[in-house]
């Protein structure tokens, strides 16, 4: 832990020296820079999280339809849901991993900055906050943390239609605001920086991701239409085959009856001919 605390302290002082060389020395800006750097390091995971969030929101109506249709068969419902996720190439757990990684980093940063003693104490402040190691007594930072968290959630989910979505939209900002009320100001600044960068990333991903999902939905609809056409074609061919088979069987059953009638008629004609033959002979004798 001592190594990590030293690493945090050295990083903050290094970034502070950069701000000082640029003419606006500020430890708050140095902490914001750390949050941006960490966000950039985690960008591959964050992008997966943001894409997963957009995709899960886009297919939510289909998820609800499957849940209602197969409510009495949970096993089949899970199979249908997994198939839906595979169709859209969605990993439901992708949104959890970056958050799980983010919290240990925030805790480590908190522990590192809690023991941090700035070399230039007069710059360890931010606007109305006289000491970054203290709680913001004005609660302005609390409002900023809760508001940015709400904005990020709203950008991801949009206008909620379901009670659970409404609950999640407001529950997370309230929880983060409640936590920020007891956090030192430097940790609120760090979380605010992470959230703002996340909002910018979300705005950059939303439009192309939704266009990709729309294209995928059209592809799935076309595949379903082709399968239906093939199924109808096979069904039609099967009906024709059964119809032809019935006609063939009917002809085969009717043919022996016709032959019997022909044979009977031939026999009757033969008997008539044999009866007429003696009469002709008798006429000739006379």
Image (tube, rainbow, N blue to C red):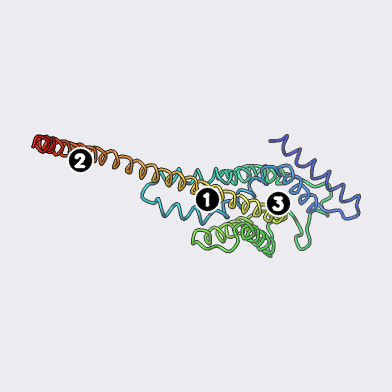
Return the x and y of residue 125 as percentages of the image width and height. 78, 56
Name the residue nearer the viewer: 147 or 190: 147
Q: Is residue 235 left or right of residue 92?
A: left
Q: Which residue is mark 2?
A: 261
Q: Which residue is mark 3?
A: 194
Judged by depth in the image, the label closer to the viewer, 2 or 1, is 2
Q: Is residue 283 above or below residue 149?
A: above
Name the residue nearer the viewer: 127 or 133: 127
Tell me how far mark 1 sits from mark 3, CA to CA. Answer: 45 Å
Q: Which mark is residue 225?
A: 1
Judged by depth in the image, the label closer to the viewer, 1 or 3, is 1
SS label for mark 1: helix
SS label for mark 3: helix
Name the residue nearer the viewer: 97 or 109: 97
- Mark found first going from the N terminus, 3 or 2: 3
Q: Is residue 207 left or right of residue 167?
A: right
């Amino acid at each position: 832990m001592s190594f990590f605390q030293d690493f945090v302290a050295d990083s903050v002082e290094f970034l502070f020296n950069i701000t000082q060389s640029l003419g606006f020395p500020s430890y708050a800006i140095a902490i914001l820079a750390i949050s941006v750097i960490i966000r950039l390091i985690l960008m591959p995971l964050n992008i997966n999280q943001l894409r997963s969030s957009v995709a899960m929101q886009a297919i939510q109506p289909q998820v609800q339809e499957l849940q209602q249709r197969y409510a009495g068969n949970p096993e089949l419902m899970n199979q249908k849901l997994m198939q839906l996720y595979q169709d859209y190439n969605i990993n439901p757990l992708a949104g959890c991993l970056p958050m799980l990684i983010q919290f240990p980093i925030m805790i480590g940063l908190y522990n590192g900055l809690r023991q941090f003693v700035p070399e230039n104490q007069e710059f360890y402040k931010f606007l109305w906050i006289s000491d970054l190691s203290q709680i913001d007594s004005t609660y302005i930072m609390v409002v900023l943390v809760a508001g940015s968290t709400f904005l990020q959630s709203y950008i991801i989910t949009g206008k909620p239609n379901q009670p659970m979505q409404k609950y999640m939209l407001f529950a997370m900002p309230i929880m983060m605001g409640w936590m920020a009320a007891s956090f030192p100001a430097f940790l609120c600044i760090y979380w605010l920086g992470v959230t703002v960068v996340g909002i910018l990333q979300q705005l950059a991903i939303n439009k192309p991701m939704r266009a990709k999902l729309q294209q995928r939905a059209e592809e799935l609809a076309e595949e379903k239409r082709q399968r239906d056409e093939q199924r109808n074609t096979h069904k039609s061919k099967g009906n024709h085959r059964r119809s032809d088979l019935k006609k063939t069987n009917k002809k085969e059953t009717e043919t022996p009856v016709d032959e019997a009638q022909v044979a009977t008629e031939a026999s009757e004609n033969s008997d008539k001919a044999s009866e007429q033959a003696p009469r002709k002979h008798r006429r000739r004798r006379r």
